[in-house]
Image (cartoon, rainbow, N blue to C red):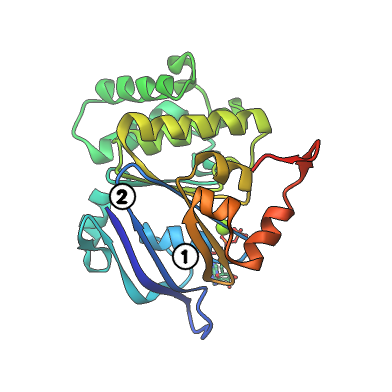
Amino acid sequence: MLSVREISITYGENPVPAVADFSLEMKQGEIVSIVGESGSGKTSLVRAILGCLPGGGHVSQGEILFEGRALSGLGPEEWRNLRGTEISMIFQDSGAMLNPVRRIGSQYVEYIRTHERVSRKEAWEKGKEMLEQMRLPAGEHIMRSYPFQLSGGQRQRVGIAMAMTFQPKLLLADEPTSALDVTTQAQIVRQMLKLRDEYHTGIIVVTHNLGVAAYMADRIVVMKEGRIVDAGTRDQILNHPSSHYTKNLLDSVPAMGGYRFV
Ligand SMILES: Nc1ncnc2c1ncn2[C@@H]1O[C@H](COP(=O)(O)OP(=O)(O)OP(=O)(O)O)[C@@H](O)[C@H]1O
Ligand SMILES: [Mg+2]
């Protein structure tokens, strides 16, 4: 489905790439977690896949193929068709992406209608149904609310619902649970697992939280200073990490009663 081939990402005139020689092969329905310290290039990587690097950032080397097509060759129209339908993204605080002065419903309807020719009423129903699938009860009520009237966890679920509306093949999630309390984190993580089970969505989840990676991921990629320092199945990384960096990362996870939960 996704094939990232030895890409480097460079910002502006900066000679040091933010990401260097990064490769990743992903199949439909797989969950890959990318972990690594702040500034290691995780966000740059997922933004490169979605073709939305900020501030003069660009893929300076290598290529990214989605379903066999090189993303670098896509025109604006093709990107518009791909984003939100085939590939979508959720951010650390999806609530911040919502317009604060417009109700959820009107934003959701507009979003659906940019991708699909349906009536307002149909779009409304579809949005409501998606919210309810994300375990947001009373979808109608949420649709009529302003973003500030919802909790952080509810807003995040609205973000996930929107990202999942068109059952994308690939979901990019950048720190999707970091802004949330532990209970809500767990709910969101379970929600994403359900998406994989129900829709066979492939998920790349960027997280600082090794616990989240350990719980969700089939495979884990560890990054440091723009490079991959370790990659393998969850068990390989958690039980037999090859690099010192990963070992240190694992050792820094707090233990409870002498038992580490990753
Ligand atoms: N908008 C930008 N303009 C210029 N350089 C940038 C920009 N965004 C990122 N970079 C460069 O890319 C590097 C990696 O940043 P990135 O945001 O990808 O890291 P990250 O792993 O997501 O960090 P964090 O865990 O803090 O979110 C940064 O150290 C910085 O040098
Ligand atoms: Mg980041």
Position in image of residue 83 (x %, y %) = 31, 49
Most extreme residue toward the right is 257
Tell me if 51 is positioned left or right of 14 in this view.
left
Most extreme residue toward the front is 240
Position in image of residue 128 (x %, y %) = 38, 20
- Cα–Cα span, label 1 and label 2: 27 Å
The dot on residue 54 is 1
Position in image of residue 237 (x %, y %) = 55, 55
For the question of whether residue 38 can be seen, the reply is no
Q: Is mark 1 within 8 Å of ligand 1?
A: yes
User: For the image shown, how many numbered marks are present on the structure?
Assistant: 2
The dot on residue 27 is 2
Q: Say which residue appears at 53% left-offset and 32% top-offset.
A: 188
Do the numbered discs 1 and 2 sit on residues whose CB atoms are within 8 Å? no
Tell me if 30 is positioned left or right of 247 in this view.
left
For the question of whether residue 129 can be seen, the reply is yes
Tell me if 238 is positioned left or right of 23 in this view.
right
Quarter of the view holding residue 211: top right
Position in image of residue 108 (x %, y %) = 38, 32
What's under tag 1, amino acid-wise?
Pro
Q: Say which residue appears at 49% left-offset and 61% top-offset.
A: 231
Secondary structure of the residue carrying tag 2 is loop
Most extreme residue toward the top is 138
**Where's ligand 2: which quadrant?**
bottom right
What's under tag 2, amino acid-wise?
Lys
Q: Is residue 144 above or below residue 199?
A: above
Quarter of the view holding residue 113: top left
